[in-house]
Image (cartoon, rainbow, N blue to C red):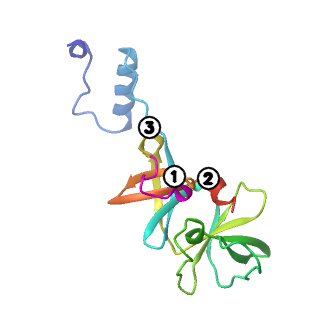
Amino acid sequence: MANEDLPQPQPSAQGPEAILEAIERQRDAGMAPEAEVERVPYLGFHVGGDVYGLPVARLREVTRVGYLRRVPGAPPGVAGLANLRGEIICALDVAAILGLGPGQRGDAPFLIALRGSSDPLGLLVDSITDIYAIADEEIEPPPATWPAERAARFLGTARVGGGFIGLLDLDRIAAV
């Protein structure tokens, strides 16, 4: 085998210096270390019994909502207006937008304030789960069993832990 001629790392060498030396030996032998897969962090949250996610880069803030002012004549996807330290945020009801029916939240749901949109927007969700690091290669298309209107609001799904996370397309969600 061609790799038999290469110097092997010494088992007695410990610490960062040994790792740097091994990388240098690989580079000298013409073997670059494998490129690490780039993972994008997603904030996970519950809506109903399912877990959904959005890129952390689009996240501005997460807070509990105490009061929402209803907007007469607004589409069902608009839960109302929330005051976030003096700024009025349009709170979108993720459950209604995804066709899951109106959200059945407790007394204090969470508002995920978003960045990157022309108007101040936030998503109303039941609870926050975790941050998940997901590589592009791990994202699969939405399940074929989902209605087309619902599937169009997703970038795809990914396996995390013991289940799946639906990755929201925030531009399509905000187009309510």
x, y percentage for residue 83? 75, 77
Query: Mark 2 vs mark 1: which is more N-terminal?
Result: 1
x, y percentage for residue 55? 57, 54
x, y percentage for residue 75? 70, 72
- Viewer-closest of 101 and 85: 101
Q: Quadrant for residue 121, please give it.
A: bottom right
The residue where tag 1 is placed is 41
Residue in the picture at 72% in, 77% down: 82
Residue in the picture at 51% in, 52% down: 41
**What amino acid type should be assigned to the residue bearing mark 2?**
Ala
Location of the N terminus (image quadrant): top left
- What's the distance in space between the residues labelled 2 and 1, CA to CA? 8 Å
Is residue 83 rendered magenta in the image? Answer: no
Callout 2 crowding tier (Cα within 10 Å): few <14, some 14–19, many ≥20: few
**83 relative to 150, above or below:** below
Q: Do the numbered discs 2 and 1 sit on residues whose CB atoms are within 8 Å?
A: yes
Callout 1 crowding tier (Cα within 10 Å): few <14, some 14–19, many ≥20: some
Callout 3 crowding tier (Cα within 10 Å): few <14, some 14–19, many ≥20: few
**169 relative to 112, above or below:** above
Residue in the picture at 76% in, 77% down: 73
Dot label at residue 57: 2
The residue where tag 3 is placed is 37
Location of the C terminus (image quadrant): bottom right
- What's the distance in space between the residues labelled 3 and 2, CA to CA? 18 Å
Q: Point out the stretch of residues depicted in magenta.
A: 141-151
